């Protein structure tokens, strides 16, 4: 099977887009359970051609993030569902409350990029939190083409940018 071709819209080559990514990769890692990675890709592919989003559940430590589970959360941005996401805060709060005392917590937010590279946009940076991991799933023609994980190097208000975070299963 051929790897799907990933279209690169011109905005991804603009200075504004390039400026949100640092060239160095993170020295930490994101480790997914096999089920969590499959589920995240399935959610992204099934949502195509809309942009869908969800939460990562697991643990974080000095080495990085361990994802045991993923959950889809509604994308409230219906008007621009093809290229924007706004995670439903009620969905976030319900999962956060459910996890209290379980030893697991919300450790990140994933979203899909339909027919675009798995690279973050300036809009993605404005909503990113330090300490969370942000996987982006590129879905092209309905098939998952690429997954990249990102973290921010500092609080965004202090000039934090995205750094790619190696991931594995
Ligand atoms: Zn995005």
Image (cartoon, rainbow, N blue to C red):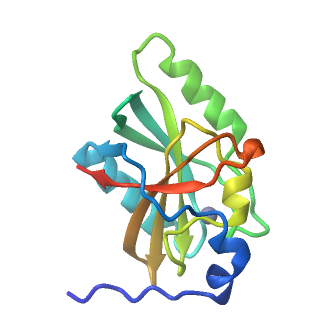
Q: Is residue 10 left or right of residue 48?
A: right
Image location (x, y in percent) of residue 123: 73, 61
Q: Is residue 27 left or right of residue 107?
A: left
Image mark count: 0
Point 62% across, 34% down: residue: 92
Point 57% across, 25% down: residue: 96
Q: Is residue 21 left or right of residue 40?
A: right
Can you tell which quarter of the image residue 141 is in? bottom left
Residue furthest left in the image: 1
Image location (x, y in percent) of residue 152: 58, 47
Image location (x, y in percent) of residue 74: 63, 49
Decide: is 42 above or below 49: above
Residue furthest top in the image: 101
Q: Where in the image, quadrant-wise, is ligand 1 located? A: bottom right
Decide: is 86 above or below 107: below
Point 67% across, 72% down: residue: 17
Residue furthest front in the image: 24
Image location (x, y in percent) of residue 25: 42, 57
Point 48% across, 20% down: residue: 99
Asked whether 88 or 6 is in front, the reply is 6
Q: Quadrant of the N terminus?
A: bottom left
Decide: is 105 above or below 145: above
């Amino acid at each position: 099977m051929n790897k799907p071709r990933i279209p690169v819209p011109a905005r991804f080559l603009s200075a504004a887009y390039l400026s949100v990514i640092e060239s160095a990769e993170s020295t930490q890692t994101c480790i997914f359970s096999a089920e969590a990675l499959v589920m995240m890709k399935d959610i992204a592919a099934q949502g195509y051609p809309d942009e869908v989003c969800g939460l990562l559940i697991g643990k974080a430590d000095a080495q990085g993030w361990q994802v045991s589970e993923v959950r889809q959360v509604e994308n409230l941005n219906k008007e621009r569902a093809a290229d924007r996401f706004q995670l439903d805060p009620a969905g976030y709060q319900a999962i956060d409350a459910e996890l209290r005392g379980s030893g697991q917590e919300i450790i990140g937010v994933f979203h899909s990029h339909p027919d675009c590279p798995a690279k973050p946009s300036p809009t993605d940076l404005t909503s990113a939190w330090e300490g969370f991991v942000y996987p982006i799933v590129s879905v092209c023609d309905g098939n998952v083409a690429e997954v990249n994980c990102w973290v921010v190097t500092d609080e965004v208000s202090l000039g934090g940018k995205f750094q790619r975070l190696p991931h594995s299963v």
